[in-house]
Amino acid sequence: MKTAILTVGTEILFGQVVNTNAAYLSKSLQNLGYDVMYHYTVGDNPGRLKELLDFAYHDCDLIITTGGLGPTQDDLTKEIISEYFGEKLVEYPDQLKILTDHFKNSRYKWTENNRKQAWFPENNCTVLANPHGTAPGFMISKNGKNIIAMPGPPREMTEMFETHVKPILESKRDSVIYYKIIRTINLGESSMETILLPLIDGQTDPTIATYAKEGECSLRVTSKRPTYEEAKAACDEMIGKVNDLIGEYIYSYEDEDLLDVVGRILKEKNITISCAESCTGGGFAKALTDVPGISQVFERGLVTYNWKAKEEELGVSRETLEKYTAESEEVAFEMVTGLKEKTGSDLCIAITGVAGPEDMSPDKPAGMAYIGISYKDDTRVVRVWRGNRGRFWNRNFFVLRMLNEVYQSIK
């Protein structure tokens, strides 16, 4: 069923409010099997709102609006929808009672302009209760098409959608969409697509789509079938084919962050871990401590930012620092071996490099780092560099690469 989402509010166009409603509704509707074709945002302007409503109505079977249902003069969504459908707005006595009772039981004073929130289209209208606010939503149906209007505040909208709108849409759908998001590391988007071209070329259902994000890539496998079971079976079959081609790069079939996967494996295998950081300034330790229950395996994190700290805390020799400088493979090796000797943790990881914002020298560019990792009988140093994207991005990239090195060691 072709669907449009129309969010109303000048504050969204001004950038004063982030439009989270559209993202939430898109995801929810796709999961229900509805094809979201358009996102519209319009200010509190009756003429432009009516134009967009007319455009969406002629091309879509379902329109969902958010915003513009309140008591003030610029809340015009209900009025414009009613006018568009040729319906007269009338007062619903039961809704007026709900509204007045709400004000009696709250600290807010009743003002007469609130009465408009109890007015709805006279015919073909279903009112949708709003337990968290004063503006009910409604659904109006005509010529086999539906418009559902909900309030703009996200808490009110999401509760109304889950409680009232979702069951209605489930009863009207003619298909189900099932999808899985696969997460990969060490594989660029262009390389992924090239490897998967035998599956992508000529695809109909299931479909495959690749997405690049910071330092990694995701793959979405989607099927739209009459039943959930059919759609899931089609996706599972396609995922098996994907796994045959790029399985070595996949770290999650459940759209998990690499941090969560690493944290889970560390806890499941009871692998103790310690870290020593220079250029990331404690970013890796901070990431690990965001994982609930990680204290059972994460022993300590050291930020050894200057030469003195590297010498005193990790036993890095002054000779190595003077000969190779702190941002070197040799120092990374001594950092991780010193950390291993000091802590005795099962896995130790250390990093030193250039966070930027500018290059230190031609052979020490910003965005370059050395990661030392020691696990079981293997101790190695890996050089990472992906160009200088700025100090903040460089540090986040380094932390992701550290997580990857841990994952590759313990998976």
Image (cartoon, grey):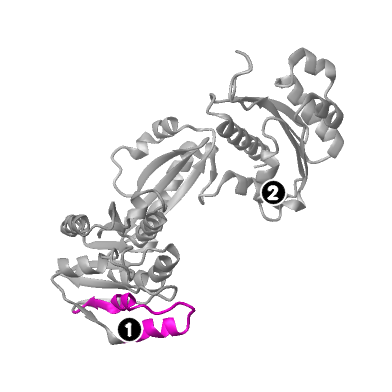
Residue found at x 69% / y 49% = 289
Where, quadrant-wise, is the C terminus in this rendering?
top right
Task: Kindly indicate the quadrant of the structure image that contains residue 185.
Answer: top right
Q: On screen, 265 above or below 72?
A: above
Q: Where does the image place residue 332, in percent across and percent down from the top left?
A: 74, 25
Assess disc 2: are there few (<14), some (14-19) or many (≥20) residues with their C-alpha within 10 Å of its C-alpha: some
Q: Do the residues labelled 2 and 1 touch (CB within 8 Å)?
A: no
User: Residue 105 colored magenta?
Assistant: yes
Q: Which label sits on residue 289?
A: 2
Element carrying mark 1? helix
Instruction: Tell me, yes or no, if residue 175 can be seen here.
Output: no
Task: Kindly indicate the quadrant of the structure image that contains residue 11.
Answer: bottom left
Q: On screen, 20 above or below 283?
A: below
Name the amino acid type tagged 2.
Thr
* Prevailing SS of the magenta stretch: helix
Q: Which of marks 2 and 1 is nearer the N terminus?
A: 1
Q: Where does the image place residue 138, in percent across and percent down from the top left?
A: 29, 73
Give the residue at mark 1.
96
Q: Where does the image place residue 156, in percent across and percent down from the top left?
A: 42, 68
Q: In this view, does 76 lie to the left or right of 337?
A: left
Q: Which label sits on residue 135?
A: none
Residue found at x 36% / y 39% = 199
Name the amino acid type tagged 1.
Leu
Residue found at x 53% / y 35% = 215
Looking at the picture, tell me which residue is in the foreground, 69 or 110: 110
Q: Where does the image place residue 239, in percent across and percent down from the top left?
A: 44, 47
Residue found at x 37% / y 81% = 99
Q: Give the extent of the magenta segment.
A: 94-122
Assess disc 1: are there few (<14), some (14-19) or many (≥20) residues with their C-alpha within 10 Å of its C-alpha: some
User: Residue 230 colored magenta?
Assistant: no
